[in-house]
Amino acid sequence: MNSENTVDVSAMNMSHWADSYAERIIREKGEKEQYTCASGITPSGTVHIGNFREIISVDLVVRALRRRGIQVRFIYSWDDYDVFRKVPKNMPMQEELRKHLRWPITLVPDPWGREKSYARANEVELERELATVGIEPEYIYQAERYRSSVYAEGIKRALEHREVIREILNRFRTEPLPGDWWPVSVFSNFTNTDNTTVLGWDGGYGVTYRCDDTGKEETVDVRSTMAVKLPWRIDWPMRWAFERVDFEPAGKDHHSEGGSFDTSRLLCKSVYDFDAPVSFQYDFISIKGRGGKISSSSGEVVSLADVLEVYEPPIARYLFAGTRPNTEFAISFDLDVIKIYEDYDRTERIYFGVEEVAEKRRAKEARIYELSQVHDTPSRMPLQVPFRHLCNLLQIAAGDIDRALDMIPELGDDDRKRLAVRALCAWNWITKFAPEDFRYTLRQPGEAKVELDEPVRRGVALLAQEVETSLSEHDEKSLAEAIYRIAGEAGVEAKALFTAMYRILVGRERGPRLAGFILTIGRERVLELLEEYRK
């Protein structure tokens, strides 16, 4: 490690779990010129938000390491030489895709006709979205590696250690592997499928197999063939050693007792003479407010792109930066969306010292805020427009984002550009996920008049007069007090006056807080809608 590039760790805010794991990596792996952090997945379908948890967990640790002035290689492996086992329900051209079951995913055609393969189509989508949230790893495509025989020596080593591997795997199996088991799998050069049986190995680089679909036999050289690869539980530790991986987390299924991480750790040391990376277990994610179990193979997925429809990029990061990875949590699409935006805005105020909290809380929130940023942390606190208020502006403007932003006073170009992203998320949420009673459309002048009792009509007329003469003098609190006073002067229950106003303004019995709503709509528009009730 180059001491000239390091920073004083003792002076750092160390309140975040990512910083704790960065310290653990350095402690367990020793000081190095460069650390390698890894993640990866099989592109068997749309990559869901549960898979994203692993990717961003690695990104957060990578950022924590780089903050110390350390060089870090962040690799993301696409396991696109895995077998295509099932056609997800959300994919087009189901019958055509079924013709390629048991093929390597990299050879399955793209059903949309845009990319060179089905695997690449799924990869491109995620790579684009990862860049949007500031995650740009070095991508490794395992099909390219295997098909160019990069792993020939790793495969040969597995064959040489066949009995060692068998013994380790059998420790965690209820039934031992059969005597004719081999630590490699083969894609048939005759049919492209993995419906093959390994028949033998010549002690060097030659592997003989039978294509079970055709009955043909063939001997291939692992230094030149595209057919041979390692099964997952051997492939993973082989690649740890090949890439010299220092850190890679895994889901709770892999980290379960006797799971793939346990076996891979033992195989990594016994076969490839390399210590397994530092790791942790991350928990599952559930979805609240839109239904469906997260599963790439079934097609019932919520992807990062889906999340970014509702959450602007820093807040999508905040969902994960603010939660320990071993904690299960739900990503909400219901009314909790409003609270999550409010929580983020509060974290931002704490970071910039606008809202005072205890020092320990301030340090924790400040670090979460830093890690939530897509790139650099802002040099000044951005103009905050609460998500709920922005929803009201958008509904008043019938979804016209420019009109809605025009209602915000003294909005500079930078803040306008940033708030346009939040506004688009807000409108997506309103139109796709918000509860029905949250949605409304501002009525237009000239629409059918709402029938009102005389005392209620008198209250509406008095309120219209207050708007005309004194609205500019009010804030939300004083206008609310004025509405209650006006109801008393008109001799009606306040609830009746509120209901009448909502019916006039949005054609419903209820709506946003009336005083703030009137202030947001503005004097001229409110008076247009109340004109018929002043006669």
Image (cartoon, grey):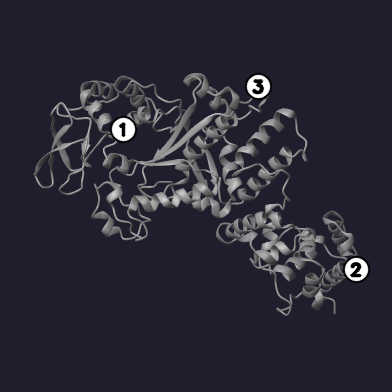
Question: How far across and down, in percent of the image, does residue 202 sit?
Answer: 13, 28
Question: How far across and down, in percent of the image, does residue 120 sit?
Answer: 36, 51
Q: Toward which corner of the image does residue 367 lie, by quadrant?
A: top right
Q: Toward which corner of the image does residue 374 lie, by quadrant?
A: top right
Judging by the rendered image, the residue that carries numbered circle 1 is 235
Residue 43 shows in this picture = yes
SS for tag 3?
helix
SS for tag 2?
helix
For image coordinates 13% across by 47% down, the residue present is: 213
Q: Earlier in the sequence, mark 2 or mark 3?
A: 3
The one nearer the camera, 401 or 483, is: 401
* Tag of residue 10: 3
Question: How far across and down, in percent of the image, does residue 524 sit?
Answer: 81, 71
292 relative position to 317: left or right: left
| Picture layout, residue 241 above or below residue 352 | above
Judging by the rendered image, the residue that carries numbered circle 2 is 469
